[in-house]
Image (cartoon, rainbow, N blue to C red):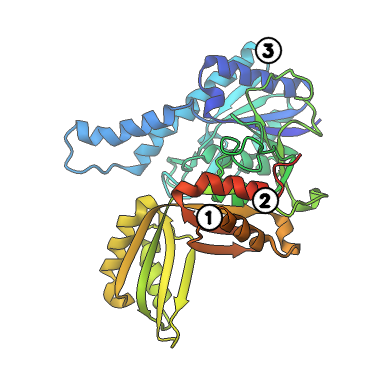
Amino acid sequence: MARIVMKFGGTSVADLDRIKNVARHVKREVDAGHEVAVVVSAMSGKTNELVGWVQNTPKVVGASSPFYDAREYDAIVASGEQVTSGLLAIALQAMDVNARSWQGWQIPIRTDNAHGAARILEIDGSEMIKRMGEGQVAVIAGFQGLGPDNRIATLGRGGSDTSAVAIAAAVKADRCDIYTDVDGVYTTDPRIVPQARRLKKIAFEEMLEMASLGAKVLQVRSVELAMVHKVRTFVRSSFEDPDAPGMGDFLNPPGTLICDEEEIVEQEVVTGIAYAKDEAQISLRRLADRPGVSAAIFGPLAENHINVDMIVQNISEDGSKTDMTFTVPSGDVDKAIKVLGEHKDKIGYDVVQNESGLVKVSVIGIGMRSHAGVAATAFKALADKGINIKAITTSEIKISILIDGPYAELAVRTLHSCYGLDKN
């Protein structure tokens, strides 16, 4: 017998028929003798609908300001998960499974007071552990907790993944199964590269890089939590037949295991290729090369919640001037340029230039730590295809390359092939 946390995303619980299918997955684990907790998202599209209601209400009543109380926002958008948890509990009860729904505040899941983007501080899992030991399935509304003001606080988009991993850590689960609309983590996007392979295992660090660099399988914060607490996490498909052979195999279930790198015996040099579209490049020309200039640039951007990614600095031959180039999401370009303009005197640049419609393609693999020539292979492969590189950043297990948007798919296919990821 094991303790399992199962999480089901919005497409998995999109309607009553899919909720019935989810209940069958849960019943399979219960019938196998496991203690089970389930975390659910809102039905597909429901959160967007609720957010739209919140945003439109000030307009409808003729308010002079479009702003609204973030605490009320949380009270409204958290209702989607509450509905799903109740419906799944009813479905399980109809299948003679002892189940009850839990809202975040009932457990409680304690968060900070950043309504709309709260972070989990602690979870008291004692009552859930007791109930699970008695054979009851805990069906938990994801994406939410209880703030220090005793108001519902939501965790931001993708927060149900974070809820599931945090609960798995709190109840000391043997594993956390994330059920979604894909059957695992692939070497790259199969829509671009049909030869992309499903990975049997991937290290926490690799998954964290892939999630932060454009892979949509898991939310970044959930991977961070899993890595910190060493929660073994499986990515699985909720659309496979719950009773198909192997679906209930506890030791080797279908899907991709995200785990500590020590569990991966044969480490590939490169594990996968990720990409992020809608990147923009901003360049500040002829800056004075002096202490504090970087802080003068990136401090105000951070204060305005503009996420800066790749940073490249070029110093003039005499060392007196420098050019600073960095990337931001395309949607933040105008805001970033405005902020930089407001601080131009303090920064001391001559001119600011920008270019949108770029793509960041990244090569990821923990095997890169012990292998030379990985970057050179990428550069040569892209050059052979006539793809110009605008910027490069590297880390111990990642190489990120900035290129023109129209070359994105060609670059992904080229890199996927040149590292042998097409091969079984």
Of the residues under marks 2 and 3, which one precedes in the sequence?
Answer: 3
Residue 109 drawn above or below residue 336:
above
Q: Nearer the viewer, residue 381 or 357?
A: 381
Q: Is residue 67 visible?
A: yes
> Alpha-carbon distance for marks 1 and 3?
62 Å
Residue named by callout 1:
386
- 389 sits left or right of 353 in the view: right
Please name the amino acid that badge 2 sits on: Cys
Q: Which mark is residue 418?
A: 2
Please name the amino acid that badge 3 sits on: Asp
Residue 310 drawn above or below residue 279:
below
Please name the amino acid that badge 1 sits on: Gly
| Residue at 79% in and 48% down | 264
> Alpha-carbon distance for marks 2 and 1?
15 Å
Q: Is residue 118 visible?
A: no
Q: Which mark is residue 96?
A: 3
